Image: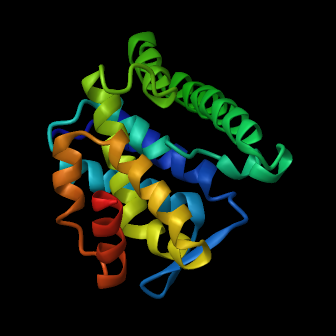
């Protein structure tokens, strides 16, 4: 998997933007801006899941949540409609932010359009790269973010989220999910969700 100079510069620029995140997360004794850590996790998981991923897909994984804190969930109605509108607006926001950075670095329009297409999650289940991105998003969620979420919510809501996550994944993604280093608590919930 060749890493181009441009790709490294893009990663640095994405991370620099995400370093402005006022939210932090401590991982293995180090404090990170939340979205910087998320971007690193996405890159690491993609490298493992699809070592031959295209440059566009690798770029997209790294900037999947770029500057997400700028559009807080609380700025939308706290119902399903508000949630869906927030998600749609975020996709466009991430795509525009990423495109501006990639343009500045000198990426060609084709690559920029591809990253935009992937960030907007177009043709999920039909486009191989969109599906790969979704699998990686789900794997990162299950490995690092699911358990803290589960402790805060009722079991029926947690199981519903797991079932929705599972449906979004490909067979390959589901297989990878079952090999994640999850706690007994998380594995028990996944087993319940899959057999509900």
111 relative to 190, above or below: above
* Quadrant housing residue 192: bottom left
- Image quarter where the C terminus lies is bottom left
Q: Is residue 124 left or right of residue 101?
A: left
**At 46% from the left edge and 15% from the top edge, which residue is drawn?**
113
Q: Position of residue 122 (x, y in %)?
A: 44, 21
- Image quarter where the N terminus lies is top left
For this rendering, which residue is in front, 28 or 134? 134
**At 37% from the left edge and 44% from the top edge, which residue is drawn?**
8
Q: How many marks?
A: 0
Residue extending furthest bottom? 29
Q: Position of residue 177 (x, y in %)?
A: 24, 59
Residue extending furthest top? 109
Q: Is residue 47 left or right of residue 56?
A: left
Q: Position of residue 31 (x, y in %)?
A: 56, 79
Q: Position of residue 148 (x, y in %)?
A: 52, 75
**At 17% from the left edge and 65% from the top edge, which residue is drawn?**
179
29 relative to 111, above or below: below
For this rendering, which residue is in front, 180 or 26? 180
**At 30% from the left edge and 21% from the top edge, which residue is drawn?**
127
Q: Is residue 181 left or right of residue 196?
A: left
Residue 55 showing in the rendered view? yes
Q: Is residue 180 left or right of residue 165?
A: left
For this rendering, which residue is in front, 76 or 184? 184
Residue 41 showing in the rendered view? no
């Amino acid at each position: 998997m060749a890493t181009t100079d441009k790709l490294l510069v893009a990663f640095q620029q994405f991370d620099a933007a995400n370093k402005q995140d006022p939210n932090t997360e401590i991982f293995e004794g180090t404090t990170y801006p939340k979205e910087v850590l998320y971007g690193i996790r996405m890159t690491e998981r993609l490298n493992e899941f699809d070592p031959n991923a295209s440059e566009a897909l690798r770029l997209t994984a790294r900037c999947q949540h770029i500057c997400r804190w700028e559009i807080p969930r609380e700025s939308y109605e706290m119902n399903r409609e508000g949630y869906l509108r927030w998600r749609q607006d975020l996709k466009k926001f991430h795509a525009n932010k990423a495109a501006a950075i990639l343009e500045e670095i000198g990426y060609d329009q084709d690559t920029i359009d591809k990253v935009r297409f992937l960030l907007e999650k177009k043709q999920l289940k039909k486009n191989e790269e969109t599906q790969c991105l979704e699998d990686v998003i789900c794997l990162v969620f299950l490995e690092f973010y699911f358990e803290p979420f589960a402790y805060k919510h009722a079991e029926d809501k947690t199981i519903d989220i797991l079932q929705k996550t599972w449906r979004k994944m490909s067979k390959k993604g589901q297989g990878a999910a079952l090999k994640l280093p999850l706690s007994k608590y998380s594995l028990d919930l996944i087993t319940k969700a899959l057999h509900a």
